[in-house]
Amino acid sequence: MHLFISDVHIRTDNSERSRRLIKFINEFKPRISDLYILGDLFEFWFEYNLVIPKHYFRTLAALYDLIQSGRRVHYILGNHEVMIGDFLKNFGFVVHPEKVKLEIDNRIVYLAHGNKIDRRIWTRMWQMLLTSKLNHTLYSVIHPDIGIFLAQVIAFISRKQKTKPNLVHVFEEYARAKLEEVDIVILAHTHIPDFKEFPDNKFYVNTGDWVKHFSYAVINNGKISLRYYDG
C-alpha cells in the first residue's frame, strides 16, 4: 500500500494535526510500503548547519521509526521547504525535486506539490523571496530562535491566502494535460481535496491538507482512492 499526504503545515508537535499525523503513521505502519509527502509537511523548513527545530522532533521521530521499520518515506519538495541541505537525505528520506514521475504498482504516476502551477501574484512573490540566495545568506546569520519565529509568521500569512475556485480549475486542467503521458497525477498545494476519473482508467487526485480536511490518497494494487482520516 502506498500513502500520499501533503500540506500538514506543522508549527509544533503539540498541535492537533501533528498528533493525528503521528497516530496515522503508527496505525498504517504494518500495512504500507511507501509514504509520499507532497510538500509543506512543516510550516517552515530551513536547514541550519547545527540546529534542528525542537518543535518538529516528535513528528520527525515517528517518521524515522517508520523508515527504520523498513518503509520508504518520499519527500517531494513544496514551497514551504525553503533551504534544503543534507539533513532530510541523511535522515533517511528519499528526497525528490518539486516534480517527479514514478512507477507505482505498474502505473506511471506524476507527483508534484504544485506551487509552480499557482501563478497568483502573492505566490510568485513568495517564490522569489524564498529562492533568493542573498536572502538565504542573510537569514542564516540570524539567531535560529528569531529566524524560525519570523519565518513561521511569514509562512502563516502566506498559507492564509485564500484559494480561489479558479485555482482548483487550473490544477485540474494541468493534470488533464499531464495525463496524456502518465496514468495518474497527484498534486497538492490548494488545500482542497479533489478526485477526478478520466477515460482510459486515468485519474487526477489532489491530496488536500491536514489543516482542515485530514485527507490522503492511497494506491493499492494499482487502484487509487481519496480518503479522510478521522482517527
Image: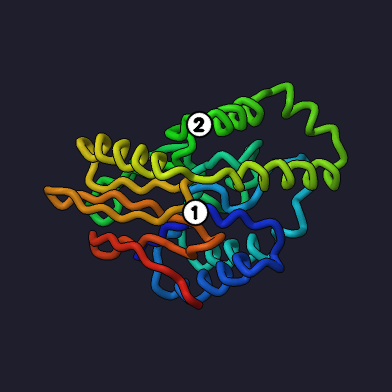
**Residue at position x 52%, y 69% from top?**
25
Residue topped by disc 1: 6
What amino acid does circle 1 point to?
Answer: Ser
Q: Residues within 10 Å of mark 2 (few under 14, many from 20)?
A: some
- The disc placed on residue 39 is none
Disc count in the image? 2
Say which of 122 and 204 sits in front. 122
**Residue at position x 74%, y 42% from top?**
151
Label 1: state its secondary structure: loop
Q: CA distance from mark 2 to mark 1?
A: 20 Å
**Residue at position x 58%, y 70% from top?**
22
Residue 164 location in percent, x, y? Answer: 46, 43
Task: Tell me, yes or no, whether the two marked residues, 2 and 1, touch with CB atoms within 8 Å.
Answer: no
Q: Earlier in the sequence, mark 2 or mark 1?
A: 1
Label 2: state its secondary structure: loop
Residue 26 location in percent, x, y? Answer: 53, 74
What amino acid does circle 2 point to?
Answer: Arg
Q: Is residue 194 left or right of residue 108?
A: right
In the image as oriented, which residue stretches furthest toward the left? 200
Quadrant containing the N terminus in the rendered view: bottom left
Residue topped by disc 2: 120
